[in-house]
Amino acid sequence: MSVRAIKEYLVGSGYKNIKWGRNKSEYTHRLIAEYKLGRKLRKNEEINHIDRNKSNNSLENIEV
């Protein structure tokens, strides 16, 4: 087991982004969608917020 420091910040488009390590970052909603599906997302898959609130990244609000 290891512990990793992360930083969450808001990007210009209104989405939240998570950054870790030196140059690694990803949109929060994409990470949550991957967790929900149990696999990596394909490049052609779209993720939507059901309530159209970009900052609401709960599992119930994300759909692929």
Image (tube, helix red, strand yellow):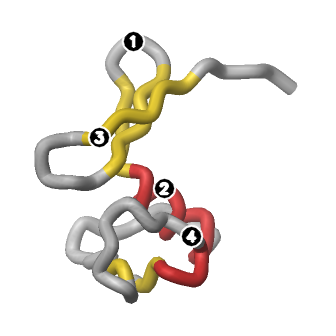
Q: CA distance from mark 4 to mark 2?
A: 11 Å
Q: Quadrant of residue 59?
A: bottom right
The residue that label 1 is drawn on is 22
Query: Circle 2 sits in a helix, a strand or a loop, which is it?
Result: helix
* Image quarter (top left, top right, bottom left or bottom right) of the C terminus: bottom left
Look at the numbered discs 3 and 4 and tell me whether their residues touch, using CB distance below 8 Å.
Answer: no
The residue positioned 43% from the left and 52% from the top of the image is: 28
Identity, as a three-letter code, of the amino acid under mark 1: Arg
Identity, as a three-letter code, of the amino acid under mark 2: Leu
The residue that label 2 is drawn on is 31
Q: Tell me the number on the disc at residue 2.
A: none
The residue positioned 38% from the left and 60% from the top of the image is: 55
Furthest toward the right, the residue is 1
The image position of residue 11, as x and y in percent, is: 21, 41
Q: CA distance from mark 2 to mark 1?
A: 18 Å
Q: Quadrant of residue 18?
A: top left
Look at the numbered discs 2 and 1 and tell me whether their residues touch, using CB distance below 8 Å.
Answer: no
Q: Tell me the number on the disc at residue 58.
A: 4
The image position of residue 7, as x and y in percent, is: 48, 26
Q: Residues within 10 Å of mark 3 (few under 14, many from 20)?
A: few
